[in-house]
Image (spheres, rainbow, N blue to C red):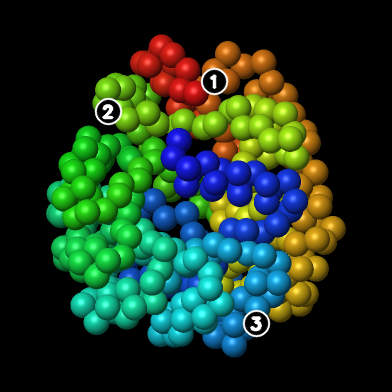
Amino acid sequence: MSPQEEIYRHLIYATAARRIPVLVMCNLTYRCPLCCKHCFAEDPEPGGEELSLAEYASLFDRLVAMNTFFLTFSGGEPLARADFLDIMAAARERHFAVRIFTGGSLIDERLAAEIASLHPSGVEISLHAATPELHDDFVGRKGTWEKAVAAARRLRELGTSVVLKMNLMNFNYTEMKEVYELSRSLGGAFRYSPCISVTNKGGTAPARLRMTDEQLRDYFRTLKDWVVAFSRDGDACDEEIGPPVRFNKRALSCLAGANNCSIDPYGTVWPCVSLPFDLGNIREKPFAEIWGGEEAERFRALSDVIAEECANCDLDRYCSRCPAFSMLEEGDIRKASREYCRFARAAKEVLRRPLR
């Protein structure tokens, strides 16, 4: 682990212990020019009034007071907002480190230059295949692959950090290496995930894109001599934080609501973009009151509950259970996620050794 990674790791655990919202994701809009078949972001308030630039500026001032440092702008497609650059400029004026999650199709040369001039900490572009036709068919718009790759190239030429992100599904997982090689050729990084969630309203259509059991085994065989996936530090320990814990055994197996949260386009605060647990709305209460409020504390109390189904499971060391999957698919944040059980079984069968 590099010194920078060690510092970041300590920051994450120390802020979680102190309930400092150091990472906040702002979903600026649910509007998007693409129709990706796996999208989980169903608009909870179609046609609702999105937060204005002035409301974001006020929110950012409050987040400064709460010691937030990292902001992520996502959606939908955040660049679909006509005032996106103004919102980003307001964030950068307050010295937030800003990351952008985008499909990349709206980033032309002018917009790339404008984004780069604001010095984001990174731009993460979704690319679902190495084959342009496959990607374009999946997102429902021709020419999107070329635009996304051109955007990544332009941003890298302007000195901006770029990540190509790929969700691995039953139709594209065999192209993972090629997308990785493309990201390297552009001078960017690569991030991937086999986790395909149902929608935030519980819609199951995206689940049809999940890899089969045999495809998952093939995926892990591919990874075996390439990279290690699903790694998670299970031995993090700090005198002020407490003893090591097995995160996947906790009802809240991540740090959602502890040091990070998501705010939807209409001002509702969620523990995580994938956990539709309403903590309050910034149009009704200041962010600090929501963060320290009754609903937030009720949610955090779940972190002290052991997930009984996971407590003595022999797949433990291969598992990184997501509580959002448990909540959305099993109806209870404390239950095992059958989808993550599938991942763990495949990993154990193929790798034959713990991943951490």
User: Most extreme residue toward the front, as rendered?
Assistant: 3
Amino acid type, residue under disc 2 in the picture: Trp
Residue placed farthest to the right in the image? 294
Estimate how packed mark 3 is, as few (under 14), some (14 to 19) or many (20 or more) residues with alpha carbons within 10 Å: few
Q: Is residue 272 above or below residue 354?
A: below
For the residue pair 89 and 73, the one nearer the viewer reads as: 89
Q: Using residue 197 as the reference point, say whether residue 183 is left or right of it.
A: left
Q: Residues within 10 Å of mark 1 (few under 14, many from 20)?
A: some
Which residue is located at x 53 percent, y 26 percent? 319
Please count the marks in the image.
3
Residue 38 seen in this snapshot: yes
Between discs 1 and 3, the one toward the N terminus:
3
Callout 3: SS: helix
Element class at badge 2:
loop
- CA gap between label 1 and label 3 equals 44 Å
- Any mark on residue 226, and which? 2
Where does label 3 land, which residue?
A: 58
Name which of mark 2 and mark 3 comes first in the sequence: 3
Q: Nearer the viewer, residue 347 or 62?
A: 62
- Mark number, residue 317: 1
Question: Percent x, y for residue 290?
Answer: 77, 65
Q: Which quarter of the image is occupied by the N terminus?
A: top left
